[in-house]
Amino acid sequence: MRRGGNGPQGLPGISVTGRRAGTFCLLLVAALCAQATRVQVFQAKELDRNSANRRLTIERYAQPRGDILVGAERVTGSEPTGGRYAYKRGYTDGPTYAAVTGFASQAYGTSQLEGTEDELLTGTDGRLAGWSLWDAVARRRKPGGDVHTTLNRAAQQAAMRGLGDQKGAVAAIEPATGRILALASTPSYDPGSFAGYGADDQEAWNRLQADPDEPMLNRALRQTYPPGSTFKVVTAAAALTNGVVTDPGAPTGAPFPYVLPGTTTPLVNDTPACDVPGMSLAAAMTLSCNSVFGYLGVRTGLDRMVATAENFGFNDPGLDVPVRAARSNFDTRMDEAQLALSSIGQFDTAATPLTMAMVAAGVANDGTVMRPQLVDRLTRSDGVTVQLVRPSVYKRATTPAVAGQLRAMMTDVVENGTGTAARIAGAVVGGKTGTAQHGAGNSGTPYAWFIAWARPAGSDAVPPVAVAVVVADSDATEVTGGALAAPIARSVMRAVLGG
């Protein structure tokens, strides 16, 4: 007689329902393992980057952040909070260097060098070697490294003082290397005012975001303006490089009045001294004659004008210093009337102060434009270098002979033309003023520009500094490049020269 419920060995039998329940449990375990694998392996990076993941922020601020340095001076620091995030970022004279450092905020992330070099500063960069095996086993974060900038402290301070309460920007470059000596934007802001995660930080952030003057806009790198007559240096380079003009002192054949091709509209000059036919390129540069440069731009032709502009940094969407700069624009499709206007820095032509500093630096460096760089080297916390940023050629914009002709004309602008406010005793200074119209019907306050380079008198070396200044808004009664921008450029160049 069979005993129900016992198997052959006397073990309890398993019902069909029990087997199904067991199978279902196995499937649940398998699904759980699959989900865990998907989340922990395949989605790990995505979840790490999720803004809702506070663990990474806690880890990032669990130890002091590495610093950003100007020369031997640390312009950043780390402050203990006693809260959930153990440290927050601090800044020494934050508004002076905000266009360079950017911000590192527990609530709002990072920008500028704080953003591009975040892994090094937080200690997660794989190049930060030298930690012990025990640290690896314990998964201790390496100390943050340091970012050594190329800035000249005196030049940066001179740029900020010169801009003052005006809305504008300065970019200064060492022509032979591309090292950025000054990068200033006004109005500025204090990145330490919202470095934490509290109510005060949120209030400071909201106030900055609502400010109509946009103090957090980096006008030196991220804002473009019509360059006005400073672009005439590029037009002159194109005309000389391509043989449209062979002798800067000879008549150009430019008619007066010069009527924009295909229209009945004459290209108006700012001074009656320009209102003569056939003026030479050298005289037109000194007096800043629109009619001559519009004529020469059309004579040079669109393709050759575009090529020259691009050799100086225009139309480059990937100019990293390492912070990404906005793309400066010179249109590649235009009719001749538009080309004439573009050749005097108007129409759709637009440039960042950085790009216009590259123009001045390229002329100063015998026609070779060096790639601009804001970082000199990256180091571990103990000072050991993990990366040295070496100078590199960006493009060869023109020949040394043409660059020499351009320098001579720019020197005459400062000695005898519209740029006399940039003169420096004991130095040779070359420059070009610009006053760019904008707004509907040119109704806006003009942008005041000045680009320049300077070297000690008697020296044949490459000038140690080139600069671009734009004043975008000012209460001054005389809004011209010579009146507003040239004195600022002078103070920055004097700082570099040691005057």
Image: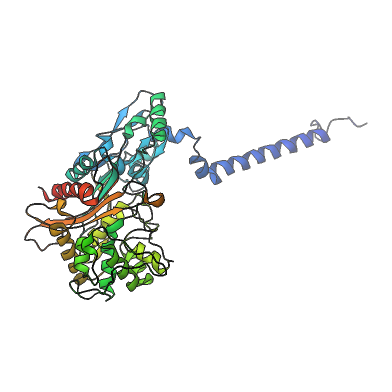
Asked whether 267 or 389 is in front, the reply is 267
Say whether residue 275 is left or right of residue 455.
Answer: right
Q: Quarter holding the N terminus?
A: top right
Residue 92 image position (x, y, % from top left): 25, 34
Say whether residue 411 is left or right of residue 1.
Answer: left
> Residue at point 48% right, 41% down?
49
Say whether residue 209 is left or right of residue 376.
Answer: right
Residue 100 image position (x, y, % from top left): 29, 44
> Residue at point 17% right, 59% down?
413
Asked whether 43 or 106 is in front, the reply is 106
The chosen color scheme is: rainbow
Residue 473 visible in the displayed image: yes
Above or below, 219 relative to 397:
above
Above or below, 83 relative to 455:
above
> Residue at point 39% right, 49% down?
439
Residue 368 image position (x, y, % from top left): 24, 65
Asked whether 131 or 269 is in front, the reply is 269
Residue 150 visible in the displayed image: no
Give the quadrant of residue 266.
bottom left
Above or below, 221 relative to 232:
above
Give the quadrant of residue 194.
top left
Residue 253 image position (x, y, % from top left): 26, 75
